[in-house]
Amino acid sequence: MRRYGRTLVAAALATVVVAGTAGWASGTSQQAVTGPPPGTAAWRADTSLGRTLPDPATASPRAVAAFFAGLTERQTAALVRRHPLVVGNLDGAPVTLRYAANARAVRAEHNPRYDRLASPGRRILAFDPRGRGQVAEVYGDLTAAREVAVIVPGSDIDAGSFDRTKDPYGTPAGMAGALRDATGDRTAVIAWTGYTTPVGVGIDAATGDLASAGATRLARFTRGLAAVGAPKPALFCHSYGSVVCGLAAHEVNASDIVVFGSPGMRADSVRALRTTARVWAAKDSSDWISKVPHVEFAGLGHGPDPAGAGFGARRVPAEHADGHTGYFVPGTDSLRAFAAIAEGDAR
């Protein structure tokens, strides 16, 4: 009974302690954005090519890639003009086509919150204005890169904050830029804010509902990369993002899964993740995530610490990282190790 009581207390603590990049704050309940992109109904009704267009909800990324491979440049340009939000978010569509479609979709929003995303030179691989907004941006040349990495963020990140200048190395854009620099610009890095993240501390951050929805989207995203010929990516999963990666591990097309500042992966061990990817974990001693009870009880909490000895992950050095958002700071041992993993040089 005493052990049961301690578990209850730990689970209760998890509801008020687990957080993401913003640290201590009040939690606000979020509704996950799921399903096909905006504009899907008009896309499905489009008969301009004399044939059915691939259904964004059911067509595999490989089928999407095969469909676009059979179109002329004029036909693809017409689809971008008519259906930018669909083409821009369609996993398996040509990368450069998605860039063009998302630039058009961002401009069409006429929302100052997203104006900077339309700046010349930005490579927006996905853009969904629903909810708080979702976005994926590529740093580097995805079509020519020998290695690819994907940053999966934790709480308090959306299309409006993924590249904020405050606490830059706590944002997916800041992490992506630092990792690309650390690899000598040889790796294409994607800042993927492709799911609805928790806001602050609350039930959303202590449960797996938002992570489960994000895992489905992440798995499809990685299959979309494979469909256009990109290398298997290394996933870098921060804080609550590691819960997403844990739930997606058995489905993602990835070479490595790297978690840092993790509250848990909703698995008891690397073996329980059922993945062929190499699994790595980093946690610095000053990270407040250490105060999170690593339990899972009645749906609360996310399970054992992936950086713990018994989990079975390969350990990433993080002695010089500082706090919960310091793992990608230039000069740290953790960033050097991340770069080696991204380039396929770590063992």
Image (cartoon, rainbow, N blue to C red):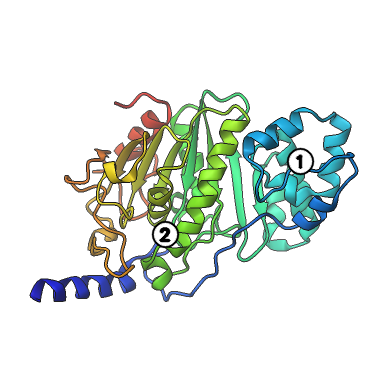
* Residue 166 shows up from this direction: no
* Marks 1/2: CA–CA distance: 31 Å
User: Does residue 11 lie above or below 71 as drawn?
Assistant: below
Q: Residue at x 22, y 46 (%)?
A: 311
Residue sitting at x 44%, y 40% = 235
**Badge count:** 2
Q: Position of residue 66 (x, y in %)?
A: 71, 30
Q: Nearer the viewer, mark 1 or mark 2?
A: 1
Which comes before the other along the chain, label 1 or label 2? 2
The residue furthest left is 2
Q: Quadrant of residue 320?
A: top left
In the picture, the disc for residue 21 is 2
Direction from residue 84 to residue 17 in the image, left or right? left
Q: Relative to 125, is 238 on the left or the right? A: left
**Callout 2: SS:** loop
Q: Specify the label residue 100 is tagged with.
A: 1
| Label 2 CA crowd tier, 10 Å (few <14, some 14–19, many 20+) | many
Q: Can you say whether 106 is above or below 184 in the image?
A: below
Which three-letter amino acid code belongs to the residue tagged 1?
A: Ala
